[in-house]
Image (cartoon, rainbow, N blue to C red):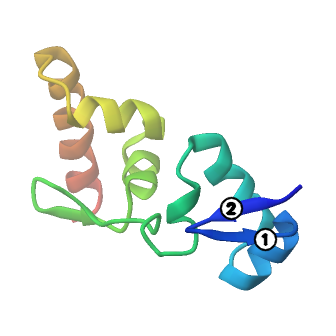
Amino acid sequence: MTVLIRGILYPSVKAAAEALGVTINAIYSALARGNIDTVGTGKSQPQPVDLDGVIFPSIRSASLALGFKRTYLTKALTSSNDRVRSKIAAALAAYKEKNQ
C-alpha cells in the first residue's frame, strides 16, 4: 500500500514509518484519524494539562489519576455542564488531599 505524506509518496507503510521515525501503528492511526500529514512532526506528543494548579504530563495521566476515562475527561473539560464540572472538581480535590 503506497502512502502519500506531505507530498512524498512512500512505497509502503513500513517505508514511511522508517523514513519518518515513527511506528507502523502511528501511520495507520494517522490514516484512520485523517491527519496523515501531521504524523512524525511531533504535534501528537502529549501536552501538559493544568487542572486548578495541578499539572499532569498529559490528559491520559490526568484521567488515570482522577479515575475517569480519557475521552470523558477531554469532553468534560470543554463542557459547560455544571454537574460534569463538579464531578471533575470533586475528583481533583480528592486527588490533592491524597497527594499532599
Element class at badge 2: strand
Work out which quarter of the rendered image holds the N terminus and state it. Answer: bottom right
Closer-to-camera residue (79/32):
32
Residue 12 lies, in percent from the top left, at 87, 66
**Which dot marks residue 33?**
none
**Amino acid under label 2?**
Leu
Q: In terms of sequence position, does the residue under pointer 2 or pointer 1 come before the other?
A: 2
Residue occupying the point 27% across, 30% down: 76
Residue 31 lies, in percent from the top left, at 66, 48
**Which dot marks residue 4?**
2
Which residue carries the number 1 mark?
A: 10
Residue 83 against residue 26 in the figure, above or below? above
- Count of numbered badges drawn on the protein: 2
Residue occupying the point 43% across, 57% down: 61
The picture quadrant where one finds residue 4 is bottom right
**Amino acid under label 1?**
Tyr
Residue occupying the point 11% across, 22% down: 80
| 69 horizontally vs 87: left or right | right
Closer-to-camera residue (54/7):
7
Task: State if disc 1 and disc 2 touch (CB < 8 Å).
Answer: yes
Work out which quarter of the rendered image holds the C terminus and state it. Answer: bottom left
The picture quadrant where one finds residue 20 is bottom right
Residue 55 lies, in percent from the top left, at 23, 65
Calculate the distance from the C-alpha at mark 2 to the C-alpha at mark 1: 6 Å
Residue occupying the point 36% across, 53% down: 62
Q: Residues within 10 Å of mark 1 (few under 14, many from 20)?
A: some
Q: Residues within 10 Å of mark 2 (few under 14, many from 20)?
A: some
Residue 70 lies, in percent from the top left, at 45, 40
